[in-house]
Image (spheres, coloured by chain):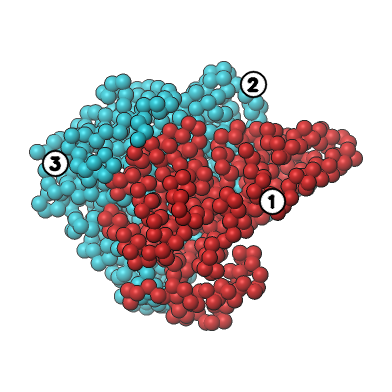
Amino acid sequence: MADATETFYSVIRRQGITRRSFHKFCSVTAASLGLGSLTASSIAQALETKPRVPVIWLHGLECTCCSESFIRSGHPLIKDALLSMISLDYDDTIMAAAGHQAEAILEETRAKYKGRYVLAVEGNPPLKEGGMFCIDGGKPFVEKLRSMAEEAMAVIAWGTCASWGCVQAAKPNPTGAAPIDKVLTNKPIIKVPGCPPIAEIMSGLVTFIITFGKLPELDRQGRPSMFYSERIHDKCYRRSHFDAGQFVEAWDDTYARKGYCLYKMGCKGPTTYNACSAVRWNGGVSFPIQSGHGCLGCSEDGFWDKGSFYDRLTTIKQFGIEENADKIGMAAAGVVGLTVAAHAAVTAVNRWTHNPDRAADKGKPS
Amino acid sequence: MAVQTPNGFSLDRSGRRIVIDPLTRIEGHLRVEANLDSDNVIRNAVSSGTMWRGIEVILRGRDPRDAWAFTERICGVCTGTHALASVRAVENALGITIPENANSIRNIMQLCLLVHDHLVHFYHLHALDWVDVVSALNADPKSTSALAQSISPWPLSSPGYFRDFQIRLNKFFGSGQLGPFKHGYWGHPAYKLPPEANLMAVAHYMEALDFQKEIVKIQAIYGGKNPHPNWLVGGVPCAINIDGIGAVGAINMERLNIVSSIVARSIEFVEQVYLPDIAAICSFYKDWLHGGGLSSKSVMSYGDIPENANDCSAKSLKLPRGVILNGNLKEILPIDHGDPEQIQEFVAHSWYKYPSDCGGLHPWDGITEPSFELGPEFKGSKTDIKELDEGSKYSWIKAPRWRGHAVEVGPLARYIIGYAQGKAEFKDPAERLLKGLNLPLTALFSTLGRTAARALECQWAAHQMRYFQDKLVVQLRSGNTATADVSRWDPESWRKEAKGYGFTEAPRGALGHWIKIKDAKIDNYQCVVPTTWNGSPRDSKGNIGAFEASLIGTPMADPQRPLEILRTIHSFDPCLACSTHVMSPEGQEMASVKVR
């Protein structure tokens, strides 16, 4: 009974779920990940034969927004993920055990599941003051992080803290907070940036790994290409207003009430790689732009140190249309024909500058 | 060996010392140590915040209109509440007013947080201190159903429902992979629920996990996402357009309907699941009334949820405002956030240093210079702490005091003050609950009271969401759709120098932000947060804070498995990322920090 060879399939069959329902579940999962029907059978095959993957979820300097986001997942439901898909053996935010009973789980996992568990890291280690700006079990958090990474199969960097450093690493970074790839250098690290990342992208990544038994394709910065290869701007439902030169000029103005483009209010959508405009948030209810505020660029490296969130993107060369956008805005007030012409030019420039195949690699603002 | 603290507690550190680190099921990193006498009763308690991030120094020199986004990232559990305190602080400093609709929407956002956070706290961070998951496997589903139906009309209560759920639970435990339930204190003698109540509660743990993600959709509608929705100095970012051209790109009828429907479902869940569960659990634990700590002595609430925009007077605030000292419920003392004599922070036992350790500093004038040192009695090494020395510095949390008094903040503090003020919406539900359990008023001053007050407040907040959503619609009907005042958006319109404060009641208690602005940039910024009050270490006079006070006198059934300590500390809903970020408003650039 203590042997961990239980498979997802055997668990749900014993729960009285029919084989037919099981395959239906696999199809829905495939669809929710944006995968074709062919992959549904791979999902079924994987879940029939694999034990639940042990997951160790550590917390460094952070705000716990990533955990909060994770439990918002609608498909799969986190209840089902916890009971039937993964074995979340350590996560100090929700685990029943505390103190030495909790610490013991880490050692047990290292020994029993050597090379077979996933290490998920939320937050990051501070490196100043001997690491003691984040103390865990009386010791620097960075020690626990290094120790658990040694025997892990793979490491997931949840959110912008673990991926890039986030708010505590913003200038002047008083604690020396560092993204985890600064201290873990010999393991594959999957970066899932965002403050926090979208729930279904987090659960989608976990489901992908247990389903296909491999890590997803990553871009040069270590992010899953399936979720981070396009900009917010590329899939934004207000893009047509950008292209038409129709911009919000002030908060709550006539144009804000018509849902015009938020570029002039500082929206960082044009330089931010994330899935918010495609997947949306909280079960698809909205995303920042849909609710009237520009994108903060929260999945980008160093987004706290790129000027005010309300500064227009004028210094970023790859965007390259800052003067045009002003002119377009003025033109939109009167001369429709000019607007359309300018729009066409801008779009053409963008297409030329951003070959979609290479966008994720070259589009990083410097 | 016993020492008497000025705030009335007797401490004795001569007995056996136990250590809990990490103290799990909280936000952030917390360590608790305690000394037990020969009867295993806690005679000394030490609470140490073990993380520090320094967000305020990071804010220095930045655009005040951006501060909400930085401070929001102080905490992702009480997401948005720091942002609210921040926009209020900036508006207070710069004399910016907001439209009525913005006030209603902000209230709905904050109330949504209260409902969500209280529910998730109870089921997912606290319930396992009262509920034995393994015992649920022995329950009779039929009796469980009878129990559930006797306390609530909630439809998911048939014998078949509980049987199916129990089968699933059985298979889960049978797999040997216990996930988050691994190494829990199952079978501990301090668990008192019968198997049937345990099964019902574990089923509701899972239902609450499913439902909580629905509640926050309200924040997503108005703020674009959750966690970490978007806010705006001068109002709210979401524009309203009910039936004009382009309404589909703004808050419109469809959006309002989503909010309205979720409000209705939230009220239903809280009243048919959360409250009945709390009453049932209280009925089995009413002999365990430990953990009162400071609550019967000194409590504080800043108040929140203004009825009218731009009016934060006690009269306008729907959550109670004031301070009670020394258990005198007859006198509610007024709070002034700008008075340098009232709110002060001390660092005698915190890993910071002042020019002189004796004095306290008001947040506008605070100094924070890290000073990590461990004292002569500590055991271990500097990077492997075995036992802390509470006679010296021992926490990354400062010690805030109101006129020198340590106070408890949070839902219980709010209910005690509301009760003392005779406000029916707080007094009546509390009395009903006590009467149903046949308990006196003094039973409120306990761990159980803290947990029950949170549930009552969750119900109050769910109904207030309805109230402000209706109020918003009334405004819209009259043609007022304004959501932001941009007359002072441009920094050119600001005074050269300004200072202000903003406050709110976070789920965990009183939260204040203080800001100084110079030449359109943040000159300094300070937050004093709920867990800084509750989790505070000792001050220079030796007063202990709420966490430590609440543990004194509690008997432990099995010190190796410190369930009673978890239960009481969890009842405060600690948020350590909030409490331990404090940084210098004078902006020391940390040159004094030694890098190894």
Residue B265 position, x and y percent, is 53, 59
Q: What whole-number distance in Å separates the C-alpha atoms at marks 2 and 3?
A: 59 Å
Output the chain of dot 2. B
Q: Residue at x 35, y 61 (%)?
A: A110
Residue farthest right in this picture: A337
Q: Which residue is mark 3?
A: B12
- The chain painted red is A
Q: Which residue is mark 1?
A: A358
Q: Residues within 10 Å of mark 1 (few under 14, many from 20)?
A: few
Residue closer to the observer: A105 or B20: A105
Q: Are marks 1 and 3 on the same chain?
A: no
Q: Residue at x 20, y 39 (%)?
A: B378
| Secondary element type, mark 3 | loop
| Secondary element type, mark 1 | loop
| Secondary element type, mark 2 | helix
Q: Residues within 10 Å of mark 3 (few under 14, many from 20)?
A: some
Q: Please, what is the three-letter code of the amino acid marked with disc 2?
A: Glu
Q: Residue at x 26, y 44 (%)?
A: B384
Q: Which mark is residue B217?
A: none
Quarter of the image where one finds residue B271: bottom left
Question: Depth-wise, is mark 1 or mark 3 nearer the camera?
Answer: 1
Q: Residue at x 42, y 65 (%)?
A: A116
Q: Which mark is residue B492?
A: 2
Q: Please, what is the three-letter code of the amino acid marked with disc 3?
A: Asp
Res. B223 in view = yes
